[in-house]
Amino acid sequence: MKTLRRMLLALAVAGGAGFATQAQDDPSCDASCQAARKAANPLADVRALMTDNTIAYNTGATDDDSYNFQLQPVYAIPRDGANIVLRGIIPFQGVQPGAALPPGIQGPTKNSSQVSGLGDITLQGFYSPTGGDIAYGFGLQASLPTRTDDALAGAGWGAGPAGVVFGQWGDLSWGGVAAHMWGEDDFSVSVLQPILIYGLGQGWYFGYNNLFSYNWKAASDNEAWTIPLGLMFGRTIVLNEEGTALDLNAGYYTVDTKPEGGPNRQFKFGISAFF
């Protein structure tokens, strides 16, 4: 755990810029394959409306299920020699009594029955130079206190740094997002999102894309970490000649390392449109 903690901190500080490998172009990659690679790339030059939805099993004091459904609009602005990528994370959540849904809701919550509503919105902005074999970006994120109930509280008013790195090696897409958020009520959470996707052809793929989180204010490492392990499968479908695409994916994860009130399993699914 100490080694993983040091890796997380190093990635958050470096913004991922220290990776180096050789991307390989694949002339056999058709339009669906190219669209799938763009869908996996957090720094792609796209306009998109993405969703990232999680059903969290056995949460809280009653071992009932919670959920976190997110809308994630993405808008990339091409500039000379760079892209500016703007992203939003708008969470709609259902939280059981005593539940924790890291990285936003560290828990355990104090509600006496299930609470559903809008959580705290996160806005992110990345500056990403273009032209290299490896895409990387660095920027800032900010949290807004938009929650409709205290049980859905995240960072409230908050901010912190964020970095992204992404590369392509044949059919393998790889990279990650590292970020930290400071917020109200002593909120201090680091996030690492590893991305490892293998293309199977015709837009089909499988791999890993989920969040590790570390709560710096937790009483111990055992309560601080959330580490889901599993696999996801999906397909990206090109809808027209203009390149509009639809991405569908689903994955199942076990969560053995988690805080009190956290889920022991996750089912994740996404439905995203790229323009």
Image (spheres, helix red, strand yellow):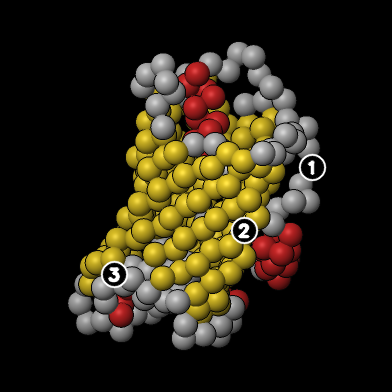
> Tag 3: residue type?
Val
Asked whether residue 257 is in view, the answer is no
Q: CA distance from mark 3 to mark 1?
A: 41 Å
Residue 179 image label:
none
Instruction: Give the farthest residue toward the front.
Output: 80
Q: CA distance from mark 3 to mark 2?
A: 30 Å
Residue 139 image label:
2
Mark 2: few/some/many CA within 10 Å (<14, 14-19, 20+): some
Instruction: Give the farthest residue toward the top.
Output: 28
Q: Are marks 3 and 1 in contact (CB under 8 Å)?
A: no
Q: Position of residue 237 (x, y in %)?
A: 40, 24
Splitting the image into 4 quarters, where does residue 241 fall? top left
Residue at 58%, 47% in the rendered image: 84
> Tag 1: residue type?
Ala
Identify which residue, 192 or 244, lies in the foreground.
244
Label 2 SS: strand
Residue at 41%, 70% in the rendered image: 144
Q: Is residue 97 left or right of residue 201?
A: left
Q: CA distance from mark 1 to mark 2?
A: 20 Å
Q: Which residue is mark 1?
A: 20
Specify which label sits upstream in the sequence, 3 or 1: 1
> Tag 2: residue type?
Gly
Splitting the image into 4 quarters, where does residue 106 fall? bottom left
Identify which residue, 132 or 262, lies in the foreground.
132
Q: Which residue is mark 3?
A: 95
Specify which label sits upstream in the sequence, 1 or 2: 1
Q: Position of residue 224 (x, y in %)?
A: 55, 75
Label 1 SS: loop
Identify which residue, 79 or 168, lies in the foreground.
79
Q: Are marks 3 and 2 in contact (CB under 8 Å)?
A: no
